[in-house]
Amino acid sequence: MSFCFNFDLPAQTTNSDDVDGNKLQNGKKDEAIKDNTKPTEPVKEAKEHLPPSDPQFLLADAVFETVSIGTLPPLHFLNETVFEKTASEREDDENILSRTAEQRSDLISGVYEGGLKVWECTYDLLEQIEKDGETFGGKAVLDLGCGAGLLGILALKRGATQVHFQDYNSTVIEQLTVPNVMLNCQEDDEADSDDDNGGRGEGNGQEEDGCKKKAKTKEEVKESNPPSKKRAVDLSQHPLLTRCHFFSGDWSTFLGLVLKTDTHPKFDIIFTSETIYNTAYYPVLHETLHKLLAPDGLVYLATKSHYFGVGGGLHLFETFVEQKGTFSLDHLWDGEEGLQRHVVVLRFKKPKDT
């Protein structure tokens, strides 16, 4: 099924407080991005989602894909094509599954924010993590705008003490993120069982009967034929799953909900991929990062230079961050081919940086 962007934005009038994208991209960074830019849709109230007490039904005969990059552990996620074809069988109180199919759209602004698709920049960030050798041991991690949750799942499998997954849509969390986390918990159990029996896990790229099994690279993920199936096991008390928290809703209400908790978590690592496509969201995104990042924490952002249709992108976001004066922003990787993609890191400015 082919898809396209449909931002479904109502007509807006332009005023002096709007972002002048042309001037900013031409280097005139003195044009301020105002905080009073508002999303066009009502905010979606945040809520926490608990993993189902009987999770087996989510993974019964699940069809999944696997991506493995370098030394990273293999990451499993529900097959996108099969997910689309079985959309009518899934619970969807938001009706986003039917709407995206009817409109043949990967994004309906303010209604569905693209969480059912694994976007290209997520793979770029995974490759950067593999290059940096980050292990996440003992760290608290937030996967902001998580979608399939691959970044948070990687942190979980590499020793994070807690991982919060957040996506705009509750359907994404319930029907994709949570099943993907459980899918990877199940894989770890099976690998442990193979090791106990003197065998080898298929996803570890180890030798079996004299042949080395190769996990699929990101380019090969889409070519799985046929995709593998998983039989569900009891995961309700899996130790990895107990480290996870799942949230849906708008970033502003998500921030308020998290800050109301007794622990007021601060995150050592915040991942966010392909989330700066709309300049209207920059103020609340910046505030969320500001309030939830630990003093010495890092924000890893993967993004495109420009998102056609809504006008956001890295250049405008860099300008916004510079004007706010809270974070420094450094480029870790810049892709030069096609629509340029980037991986950057944000950290709090030190007094000498201001």
Image (spheres, grey):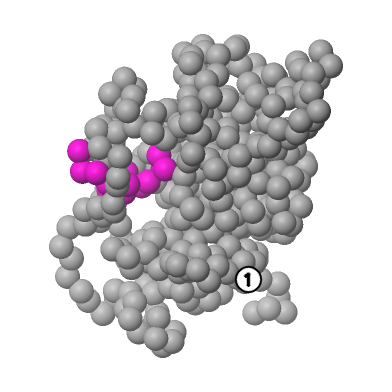
Q: Nearer the viewer, residue 150 or 276?
A: 150
Q: Nearer the viewer, residue 64 or 145?
A: 64
Badge 1: how crowded within 10 Å, few (<14), some, or many (20+)?
few
Residue drawn where x is 29% and y is 53% of the image: 5
Residue on which disc 1 sits:
330
Give the magenta part as a residue range.
102-117
Q: Is residue 179 visible?
A: no
- Whether residue 4 sits left or right of residue 296 in the image: it is left
Residue drawn where x is 52% and y is 20% of the image: 229
**In the image, residue 205 above or below residue 233:** below
Residue drawn where x is 57% and y is 56% of the image: 124
Residue 201 location (% of width, % of height): 73, 25
Q: Magenta stretch mostly in which secondary structure?
A: loop
Q: Is residue 304 magenta?
A: no
Residue 78 location (% of width, % of height): 48, 30
Where the N terminus falls, by quadrant?
A: top left
Q: Give the residue furthest to the front.
A: 210
Q: Nearer the viewer, residue 30 or 137?
A: 137
**In the image, residue 223 above or below residue 324:** above
**In the image, residue 335 above or below residue 120:** below
Q: Nearer the viewer, residue 47 or 53?
A: 53
Q: Quadrant of residue 346?
A: bottom right
Q: Say which amino acid is labelled 1.
A: Asp
Q: Is residue 114 magenta?
A: yes
